Amino acid sequence: MIELRSDTSTQPTPEMRAAIAAAPVGDEQRREDPTVNELEARAAALLGHEEAVFLPTATMANQIALRILTEPGDELLADAHSHLFINELGGPAVHSGLAMRPLPTAAGRFTADQVREAVWDRRDTHRPVTRVVSIENTNNSAGGRVWPVDEVAAVAEACRELELSLHLDGARLMNAAVASGSPAAELAGRCDTVTLCLSKGLGCPLGALIAGSADRMLKARRLKHLFGGAMRQAGIVAAAGVYALDHHIERLADDHARARRLAEGLSAAGLAVDLEQVETNFVQLDVGPLGLSTHEAIVKLREAGVGLSGTVYPSVLRAVTHLDVSDEDIEQAIELIPRALGAQRSPASQKPRTTIA
């Protein structure tokens, strides 16, 4: 099976497994685990914040961030198809008592002016207090699209003007940094809180981080316990994160190049792929023009030996490249996907392979 359903399917490399096995550990609840402490310090510096807290999952990290930044009854503004809204089971309402108002977006991004227009007048006692704005970089539902640093800065400035907090769901933030050439700290440092997932493109078996000011991270540590995320000798898994920061960031460019090759090959074969949308490691494929439903297409592809997954959009599938996908896998996928879906291959797709170092 050529596994393109998600970059969460990555397996730890032999070198990462060796780092895990050799990790010095301690009681992380007492902040005595040296590997956890190293990961947190390095992540804080990477993201441009005072402190970071190691957590089991990025969903927990997002929910803790919202709990820190709000009071029950406050309002959250975010992209209508953001992970916070459609993949976290109503967590902002359940865990923080928030009203959630979606903003329409283009390529997963809204503007500073949209934020200004959306904020309720706080003198109106019949409406919730708009308190926090969340952006997602890269944006999953938009096909791995990147928030450019100038647009992040503009939204951050609007939030400061309006006394709003700004949260960054940076599950794939390092993909955004590599693709844009902007340091992660430039993309994240203007936000009040930021989360980073370790188990996607960075290739760790599990784990995430939340970063922010020292005061906010003190609250995050308390909420980590409250949410059931406190661990013991967690250096065993934090070691994978330390290894990933050293070895798996720059190589994300390989995933992006492979996604571009896949998109170009599928497009040349006559499949509905928007090449302008391919900015990082996502390729979205619309099977509607082929008369197929999402389920039908996924079954056909699985039978052909290729794993793709559905998206929030009817008839649109996604392929996600990652460190376990090779050049050979991409070339095979370019052959197998059109054939499985009954698309007609164009001679233009038979261009020489591009090998990624």
Image: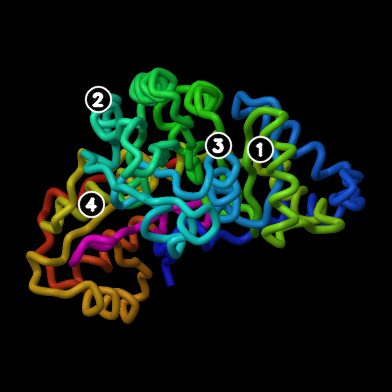
Reading the image, the residue beneath label 3 is 194
> In this rendering, is residue 251 above or below 55?
above
Mark toward the viewer: 3 or 2: 2
Q: Earlier in the sequence, mark 4 or mark 2?
A: 2
Mark 3 falls on what kind of element? strand
Q: Residue 265 bears which disc, if any?
A: 4
- Tell me, yes or no, whether the two marked residues, 4 and 2, touch with CB atoms within 8 Å: no
- Tell me, yes or no, whether the two marked residues, 1 and 4, touch with CB atoms within 8 Å: no
Reading the image, the residue beneath label 1 is 245
> In this rendering, is residue 100 above or below 52?
below
Hey, what amino acid is under mark 2? Asp
Q: Is residue 208 left or right of residue 177?
A: right
Q: Is residue 314 left or right of residue 100?
A: left
C-alpha distance separating marks 3 and 2: 22 Å
C-alpha distance separating marks 3 and 4: 35 Å
Q: Residue shown at 39%/18% (left/top)? A: 161
Q: Which residues are magenta?
A: 312-329
> How busy is the neighbourhood of tag 2: few (under 14 within 10 Å), some, or many (20 plus)?
few
Q: Nearer the viewer, residue 117 or 128?
A: 128
Q: Residue shown at 52%/63% (left/top)? A: 9
Q: Residue 113 bears which disc, if any?
A: 2
